[in-house]
Image (cartoon, rainbow, N blue to C red):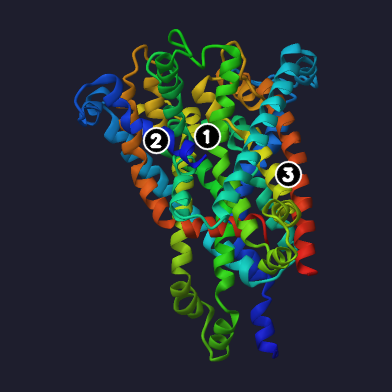
């Protein structure tokens, strides 16, 4: 199975040489830029969208996750479960009203059309993940500081912020990868403009043509996902830990 | 705990204030659309405008043979996809859990389907399934299994199977990782005791591992049923629901009605059906999770 899971990627690497050209060159990697003239733009868009989406997500998630980790208040548990439930609604079901809302605000065919719904679907998991990181910081530290007369702001900036940096980085990267992965659906639905397309929908357009240059298509896809792949390989341990602890245990 | 500390630890107002931005955002982007979808399902809304039509959308939808077929197809598709994912995931987790050499390499190997954005992974599968240039047809022709180019996505049955395989490829790693985490949580002394009593490897798996991880197996089957049910990109990129509707599931049908034809009303009625089914799944999942957590906290 592990072999099988690797196969497609492995084949992609080999594909140009087996079927399209005799010499083992990176020919496809050179040609693709002219076949898909907007490719640099797509790559930029993908990164731009994923970065903004994940940063905005963090902005919403940090205070909420801190609150869930530290305070007890009415409806805490049920609202946490509601967050989990939201995760199960795919964006596909809610596209109709979202489409109408975006149209009313004149946001169709803009970057915002892809960022705004993207953030909403990343918030729930990100809160669960970050909450578990905040919980690992001992409350005693904060209490001690409080007794010593530190203000909440001081506690946040001097104790919480430095201690939670690793957690923030992991959650930020989770959000980045998530934002990168979910681009397709929102992009094909809310955006028709080439100059705003991320990689997946940009390349998808070319599949419709009669003669698809598969090798170049594959090369372009690989270039587009390489950065995310590398990020993930470095961080897989933390991400796996966080995800499994959120969904199976409490 | 002194008074000052207690007030430090339970400021309800502050707690809500910190959650408010996220909550309001989700209310606006998720909760409002849910209500709006329900409202739209009782109208004939389109780009032109909308009128209230009562249950017309639902009556038409439920009485059409095509829709009933789509529902059946969705569940058949889900059944095969989910059971394959669980089966392969279980085997994978057992292999990963056994102290084999090169285990860390295995871990890296199960990553691609998970990390590669689904949409891009599917572009790769599109090529694999291609009748003329794809590697599968290529190997088939080379070995004589196929006597000519064969487009796997061009025929009803093979397209149905092909989309399931691609979906299993995407979903299995997640399942494997969860199973593995569960297996590593099984107390070691159970195995040691069984080993002393002379239990065989199979016995130890069947009588210790399996019962111990049953809660996770059940949770994962519901979770992956939900993910599979929601699966949109895989089918959309591979076949757009074709050929002749052979791979049109509920989600695909909803999308086509709503944003292919801009018949928002009809699409909304389908979306409501999807949401009801999802709510049922999610309810099962959350009820289970609450029970498991209770068990854990009671020891």
Give a yes or no on whether discs 2 and 1 share a subunit: yes
Please state which of the two labelled residues, at mark 1 or mark 3, is closer to the viewer: 3
| Residue A205: quarter of image | top left
Residue B282, numbered label? 3
Q: Position of residue A49 (x, y in %)?
A: 40, 43
Q: Residues within 10 Å of mark 1 (few under 14, many from 20)?
A: some
Q: Are marks 1 and 3 in contact (CB under 8 Å)?
A: no
Q: Which residue is mark 1?
A: A102
Q: Is residue A53 above or below residue B136?
A: below
Circle 2 crowding by C-alpha within 10 Å: few under 14, some 14–19, many from 20: some
Chain hosting mark 2: A
The image shows residue B15, relative to residue A93, as above or below, that is below
Location of mark 2 (residue)? A9
For residue B219, side relative to residue A186 (left or right): right
How far across and how far down the image is residue B284, in percent?
A: 78, 45
**Residue B247 visible in the current orientation:** yes
Which chain is indicated by disc 3?
B
Query: Quick one: SS at disc 1?
Result: helix
């Amino acid at each position: 199975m592990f072999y099988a899971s690797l196969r497609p990627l492995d084949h992609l690497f080999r594909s140009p040489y087996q079927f399209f050209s005799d010499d083992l060159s990176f020919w496809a990697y050179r040609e693709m830029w002219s076949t898909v003239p907007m490719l640099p733009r797509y790559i930029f868009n993908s990164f731009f969208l994923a970065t903004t989406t994940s940063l905005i997500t963090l902005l919403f998630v940090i205070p909420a996750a801190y609150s869930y980790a530290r305070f007890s208040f009415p409806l805490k548990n049920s609202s946490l479960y509601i967050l989990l439930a939201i995760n199960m609604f795919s964006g596909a079901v809610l596209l109709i009203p979202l489409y109408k809302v975006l149209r009313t605000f004149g946001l169709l065919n803009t970057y915002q059309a892809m960022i705004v719904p993207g953030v909403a679907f990343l918030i729930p998991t990100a809160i669960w993940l970050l909450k578990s990181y905040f919980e690992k910081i001992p409350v005693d530290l904060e209490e001690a500081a409080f007794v010593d007369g530190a203000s909440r702001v001081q506690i946040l900036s001097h104790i919480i912020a430095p201690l939670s940096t690793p957690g923030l980085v992991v959650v930020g990267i989770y959000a980045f990868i998530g934002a990168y992965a979910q681009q397709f659906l929102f992009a094909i639905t809310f955006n028709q403009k080439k100059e705003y397309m991320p990689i997946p929908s940009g390349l998808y357009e070319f599949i419709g043509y009669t003669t698809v240059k598969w090798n170049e298509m594959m090369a372009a896809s690989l270039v587009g996902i390489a950065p995310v792949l590398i990020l993930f390989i470095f961080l897989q341990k933390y991400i796996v830990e966080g995800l499994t602890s959120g969904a199976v245990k409490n | 705990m002194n008074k000052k500390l207690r007030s430090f630890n339970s400021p309800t107002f502050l707690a809500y204030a910190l959650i408010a931005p996220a909550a309001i955002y989700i209310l606006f982007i998720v909760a409002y659309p849910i209500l709006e979808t329900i409202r739209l399902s009782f109208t004939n809304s389109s780009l032109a405008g909308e009128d209230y039509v009562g249950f017309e959308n639902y009556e038409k939808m439920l009485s059409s043979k095509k829709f009933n077929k789509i529902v059946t197809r969705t569940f058949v598709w889900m059944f095969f996809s989910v059971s394959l994912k669980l089966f392969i995931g279980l085997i994978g987790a057992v292999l990963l859990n056994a102290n084999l050499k090169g285990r860390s390499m295995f871990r890296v190997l199960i990553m691609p389907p998970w990390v590669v954005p689904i949409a891009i992974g599917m572009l790769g599968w599109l090529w694999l399934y291609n009748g003329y240039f794809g590697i599968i047809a290529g190997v088939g022709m080379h070995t004589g299994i196929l006597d000519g180019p064969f487009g796997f996505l061009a025929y009803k049955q093979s397209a149905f199977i092909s989309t399931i395989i691609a979906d299993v490829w995407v979903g299995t790693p997640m399942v494997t990782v969860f199973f593995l985490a569960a297996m590593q949580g099984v107390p070691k002394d159970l195995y040691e005791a069984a080993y002393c009593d002379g239990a065989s490897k199979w016995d130890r798996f069947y009588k210790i591992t399996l019962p111990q991880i049953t809660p996770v197996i059940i949770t994962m089957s519901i979770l992956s049923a939900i993910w599979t049910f929601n699966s949109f990109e895989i089918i959309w990129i591979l076949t757009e629901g074709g050929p002749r509707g052979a791979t049109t599931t509920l989600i695909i049908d909803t999308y086509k009605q709503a944003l292919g034809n801009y018949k928002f009303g009809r699409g909304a009625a389908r979306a409501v059906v999807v949401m009801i089914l999802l709510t049922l799944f999610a309810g099962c999942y959350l009820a289970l999770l609450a029970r498991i957590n209770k068990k854990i906290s009671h020891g």
